[in-house]
Image (tube, grey):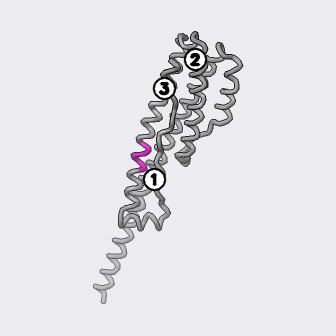
Amino acid sequence: MSSTFIAIFVLVVAAVVWVVSTQRKLVVLDENVSSAMSQIGVQLSSRLDALTALLDLTKNCAGHEVEPLMETVKSKRSTITATSTPEDVLRQEEVIAEVLRKISTMAERFPELKSNPSYLRTLNAVDTFDNMVRTSRLIYNDSVAKFNREIRMFPTSAVAGMLGFRQREYLVEADKGDMSAMK
């Protein structure tokens, strides 16, 4: 009787240890996804700051046309955090793309803008932050793939379901418009 009790006790302890270690692994993977989303937020915020600086430089040439764009950036700017969704990121990128298209149109009408060294430097900064967002997006999607793969595989899927872990969405590429016309 005591050997049966010991065997059951060992099995219960092993099951508890496995569930705890699985939960810890899932938490780490989930945190990696959240951290990657936060990094995207930092890069988007920096890109919006560079875009605002670009709009400030555009004021000299296109004065009254810039104010509505500045208001668009201010009113539609949102903070992307660890709890943000891919849809939040896409909405923010749509704002950026819309403003960049309008700046591109202005740059075509005001050739002196395209030859302004400060304008070109700031435009390059916007482009640099775009590349950083693209890299952060790859890291995010890789983190999501690892997390989703783990919670879909048996027997981890059973523990993930019991503990409330759900698949995360991938972040797809948004249409950003063509920045080459602005240079």
The picture places residue 127, in percent across and down from the top left corner, at 48, 26
Residue located at (56% from left, 31% from top): 97
> Would you call the spot at circle 1 few (<14 residues within 10 Å), some (14-19), or many (20 or more)?
many
Tag count: 3
Compute the Cα span from label 1 to label 3.
Answer: 30 Å
Q: Residues within 10 Å of mark 2 (few under 14, many from 20)?
A: many
**Outermost residue toward the bottom?**
1
Residue type beneath disc 1: Asp
Between 111 and 151, which is closer to the camera in this rendering?
Answer: 111
Q: What is the span of residues highlighted in magenta in the rendered image?
A: 139-144
Tell me the SS state at disc 2: helix
Identified by mark 3, the residue type is: Asp
Q: Is 77 positioned to the left or the right of 38 in the image?
A: right
What number is the disc on residue 127? 3
Q: Looking at the image, tell me whether mark 1 or mark 2 is earlier in sequence order.
A: 1
Residue wearing tag 2: 107
Q: Quick check: can you spot residue 53?
A: no
Rendering quarter of residue 25: bottom left
Eyeballing the image, is 73 above or below 30?
A: above
Q: Is residue 88 magenta?
A: no
Identify the residue at horizontal 55%, vertical 43% (top origin): 81
> Could you say where residue 145 lies in the image, as x and y percent from the top left?
39, 50
